[in-house]
Each structure stands twice: as structure tokens, then as C-alpha cells.
Image (cartoon, grey):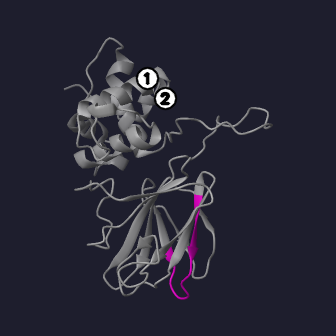
């Protein structure tokens, strides 16, 4: 089972252009890592060789650091001698940690992260996702025996979970209601929340893809096309809502996470 997913930077632009809030113009290249896997990042050899995560900026060391997948989180090592690296929590409203020069194996607890390195051309960055984070209730009750791995590890404090709740809201309020909100309706439903004021249609599509293909690992066949959202989004949303409600991933009490509904 993969522990982390690294979204590689666009080789034509060292800036991380495919963020959840900006949307992706094209399918990003992903690197899947399992427990114990280690990959390096930096400028590498001429042409970006020698490292798995190439950051094409002359201000970045050839071997700037490395990532290590460990359990349900990951570690970051800073091979630099003079500058710190920043790991931003993309769901944390400005929360971040710094990894000091020479620091090895710093644990990163965030599920959605952006690693930022100082560079000559502004900054260089890449994203790291840890979709298998464990939450309360996934371990054996008496603390003995092997850990139970939940097949659907969802973080109720995340933005993607808000998207899922908004998607399921009509059926939670009225099980006979077969209609599902469209992407634009989900945007308008969530925007009153402080954390969602800058939410866009592209961001909602990004979170729906993340839920469908990474968190719930749905087999949508030909109905949903490819993971970059090029297929029928209606079938994808319908399948998401069906699985979430069927297995109790979204329940009536989760409606309290949404903004209060007002009369038209």
C-alpha cells in the first residue's frame, strides 16, 4: 500500500502550478511511494538526472534532500548547510513547519503538503500527499494484535471532506432526493465558510478526483474516464455519493460542518 504520493513539479516551470486551489491544466506526473521507499530531490545532474524530484533552478543544490515514506506519514531530510526548507500544510490556513539545514528525517504530519525551497527564481516547490493517515477508531480497541487499516481513511477537518459532505447533503436531508449538486453549486454552498472563500470550480474538481481515485479508490470503469477529470463528472459524483452514504462515511451529524442555509 502506498504511503505517500509526490506530485512532481512541471519541468517547464519550477513553480508548483497544479495546486488544489488553482486546478491543473493538465494531468500532473505522480510518484507513488510505499513504506521504506526513499527518493531524493534537487537540481540533480545536467538535465535533472540523479534525483527523482528534479527542481531546475541554479540556486538549488544538486542533492538538496530526500523524502522517506514511513508508516502513514513521511520524513524530510535537508542536506543543505545554509538554508531551511518549509513544509506548508495546504489545508491548514497558513500552518507550516521548517526543516533546518542538516536536519535528517524530520517527520511531517500533514496530509496535504507543499515543500518549498528558496531559489534564485522566486521559490521552487513540489507537493506531497499522505492519503493513508490513520484516525481514531482504526486501531484495535484493546490495543493488542495487529492494527486494522481502515479502507477509507478520511480526515473530517479537510477541505475535500467538506466537498464530500456538500455533495451528499441533498440525499442526507431527503433520501428520496436523487439529485446531486453540480460543481458550481458545491462552490456556492461552501464559499460562506472562511476556509473556502477562495474555493474555485477547479479546486472542487481536484478534490472530487482525489476522493474518487486516491481516498476511496473507486473503480469507475469507462464512465469516469481518466483521473484528470476528462470523463463524465456526473457518474463520478454519483458513485462518490453512493459509496459515502452506503458505508456511513458521511452522516447526518456532518451537516453541521456546512454553513447555515438561508432562505432565498
Question: Which residue, given by chain and number where applicable, does mark 1 sit on?
Answer: 245
The residue at which mark 2 appears reads as 249
Residue at (25% x, 48% y) in the render? 202
| SS at badge 2 | loop
Q: Which mark is residue 193?
A: none
Q: Could you tell me which residue is drawn at 46 percent across and 30 percent down? A: 254
Give the answer, above or below, for where 91 lies relative to 56.
above
Q: Residues within 10 Å of mark 2 (few under 14, many from 20)?
A: some
Q: Residue 174 occupies which quadrant of the picture?
A: top left
Residue 30 vertical placement versus 171 (above, below): below
Query: In the current view of this chain or complex, which residue is farthest to the top?
Result: 176
Q: Which residues are magenta?
A: 74-85
Nearer to the camera, 164 or 35: 35
Mark 1 surroundings: few (<14), some (14-19) or many (≥20) residues within 10 A:
some
Q: Is residue 260 visible?
A: no
The local secondary structure at tag 1 comes to helix
Amino acid at each position: 500500500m502506498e504511503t505517500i504520493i509526490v506530485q512532481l513539479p512541471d519541468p517547464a516551470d519550477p513553480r508548483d502550478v497544479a495546486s488544489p486551489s488553482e486546478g491543473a491544466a493538465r494531468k500532473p506526473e505522480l510518484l507513488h511511494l510505499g513504506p521504506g521507499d526513499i527518493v531524493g530531490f534537487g537540481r540533480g545532474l545536467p538535465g535533472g538526472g540523479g534525483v527523482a524530484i528534479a527542481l531546475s533552478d541554479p540556486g538549488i543544490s544538486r542533492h538538496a534532500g530526500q523524502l522517506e515514506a514511513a508508516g502513514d506519514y513521511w520524513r524530510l531530510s535537508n542536506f543543505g548547510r545554509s538554508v531551511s526548507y518549509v513544509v506548508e500544510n495546504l489545508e491548514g490556513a497558513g500552518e507550516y513547519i521548517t526543516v533546518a539545514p542538516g536536519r535528517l528525517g524530520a517527520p511531517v504530519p500533514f496530509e496535504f503538503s507543499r515543500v518549498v525551497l528558496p531559489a534564485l527564481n522566486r521559490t521552487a516547490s513540489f507537493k506531497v500527499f499522505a492519503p493513508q493517515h490513520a484516525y481514531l477508531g482504526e486501531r484495535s480497541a484493546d490495543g493488542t494484535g495487529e492494527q486494522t487499516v481502515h479502507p477509507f481513511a478520511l480526515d473530517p477537518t479537510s477541505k475535500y471532506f467538506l466537498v464530500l459532505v456538500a455533495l451528499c447533503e441533498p440525499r442526507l436531508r431527503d433520501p428520496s432526493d436523487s439529485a446531486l449538486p453540480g460543481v458550481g453549486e458545491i462552490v456556492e454552498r461552501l464559499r460562506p465558510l472562511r476556509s473556502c472563500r477562495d474555493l474555485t470550480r477547479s479546486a472542487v474538481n481536484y478534490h472530487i478526483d482525489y476522493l474518487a481515485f486516491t481516498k476511496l479508490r473507486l473503480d469507475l470503469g469507462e464512465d469516469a474516464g481518466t483521473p484528470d477529470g476528462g470523463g463524465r463528472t456526473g457518474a463520478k459524483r454519483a458513485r462518490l455519493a453512493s459509496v459515502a452514504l452506503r458505508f456511513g462515511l458521511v452522516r447526518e451529524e456532518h451537516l453541521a460542518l456546512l454553513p447555515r442555509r438561508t432562505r432565498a
